[in-house]
Image (tube, rainbow, N blue to C red):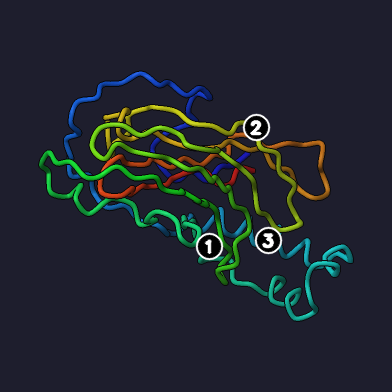
């Protein structure tokens, strides 16, 4: 079994912990984070080879046009990417609130925001192949604490070559390299298993995504994950 891992943290515990200080949040100037990047050539080659093999089967004709099937079969074996993105009308997706870069204590007005986030992998043509999706509403007092208003709702989007099952969906308060203030910066996330189309009894576990949300500057966030394991 091989694995594609992007991010520094493993799956979090599936419980939400609501303890924390209500002191004024101190912005620690975390670094802005990427929303897209390459995966290894070896993993990309294996992924594209699987997709090409599926595109040659009669079953793929129900999902792909003849030209799409040919594109999958002849797709280059390098250039796959991981990506994160947000849904329309939600809080910023390119990570961090602008005021977090100032490195000084501050307070802003209270707010509530929707955080629709995806984390996944795409083939060399940019077509998403497997995605985790979390959607939740968080509210903040503007300076020290965030609480869950609704959700978390979790799902997967995949090509028909794969099946998926969400195994955990929830929130956690765990420190990261971006913020150790778990009262101000909780997380929403999910774990999932997936299986290959012709071996539905063989589940691959360990895929996950996490989004850390921030209590200041109208709700910045950052997302990371582990989107493929085979």
Name which of mark 1 and mark 3 comes first in the sequence: 3
Q: Quadrant of the N terminus?
A: top right
Left or right side of 229 for 147 = left
Q: Which residue is mark 3?
A: 49
Q: Residue furthest right?
A: 58
Name which of mark 2 and mark 3 comes first in the sequence: 3
Q: Which residue is mark 1?
A: 80
Name which of mark 1 and mark 2 comes first in the sequence: 1
Q: Nearer the viewer, mark 2 or mark 3?
A: 2
Left or right side of 144 for 65 = right
Between residue 150 and residue 205, name the one nearer to us.
150
Left or right side of 105 for 108 = right
Where disc 2 sits, the SS reads: strand
Q: Quadrant of the C terminus?
A: top right
Q: Which residue is mark 2?
A: 167
Tell me whether the residue at label 1 lies in contact with that at label 3, contact meaning CB atoms closer than 8 angstroms. no
| Residue 53 image point, x, y percent | 77, 62
Where disc 1 sits, the SS reads: loop
Report the Cα–Cα distance between label 2 and label 3.
27 Å
Residue 9 figure quarter? top left
Residue at left offset 54%, top offset 45% = 134
Between residue 155 and residue 63, name the one nearer to us.
155
Residue at left offset 21%, top offset 45% = 108
Report the Cα–Cα distance between label 1 and label 2.
26 Å
Q: Residues within 10 Å of mark 3 (few under 14, many from 20)?
A: some
> Is 44 above or below relative to 112?
below
Left or right side of 29 for 147 = right
Q: Which mark is residue 226?
A: none
Between residue 178 and residue 39, name the one nearer to us.
178
């Amino acid at each position: 079994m091989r694995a594609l891992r992007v991010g520094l943290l493993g799956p979090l515990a599936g419980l939400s912990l609501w303890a924390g200080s209500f002191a004024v949040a101190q912005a620690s100037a975390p670094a802005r984070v990427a929303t897209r990047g390459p995966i290894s050539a070896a993993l990309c080659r294996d992924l594209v080879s699987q997709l090409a093999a599926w595109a040659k089967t009669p079953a793929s004709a129900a999902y792909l046009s003849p030209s799409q099937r040919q594109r999958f079969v002849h797709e280059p074996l390098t250039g796959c990417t991981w990506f994160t993105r947000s849904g329309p009308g939600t809080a910023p997706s390119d990570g961090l609130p602008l005021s977090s870069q100032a490195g000084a204590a501050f307070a802003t007005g209270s707010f509530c925001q929707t955080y629709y986030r995806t984390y996944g992998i795409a083939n060399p043509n940019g077509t998403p192949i497997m995605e985790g999706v979390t959607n939740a509403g968080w509210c903040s007092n503007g300076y020290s604490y965030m609480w869950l208003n609704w959700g978390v709702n979790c799902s997967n989007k995949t090509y028909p070559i794969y099946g998926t099952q969400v195994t955990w969906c929830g929130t956690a308060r765990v420190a990261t390299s971006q913020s150790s203030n778990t009262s101000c910066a909780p997380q929403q996330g999910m774990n999932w298993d997936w299986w290959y189309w012709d071996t539905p009894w063989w589940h691959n576990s360990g895929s996950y995504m996490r989004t850390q949300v921030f209590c200041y500057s109208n709700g910045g966030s950052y997302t990371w994950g582990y989107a493929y394991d085979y």
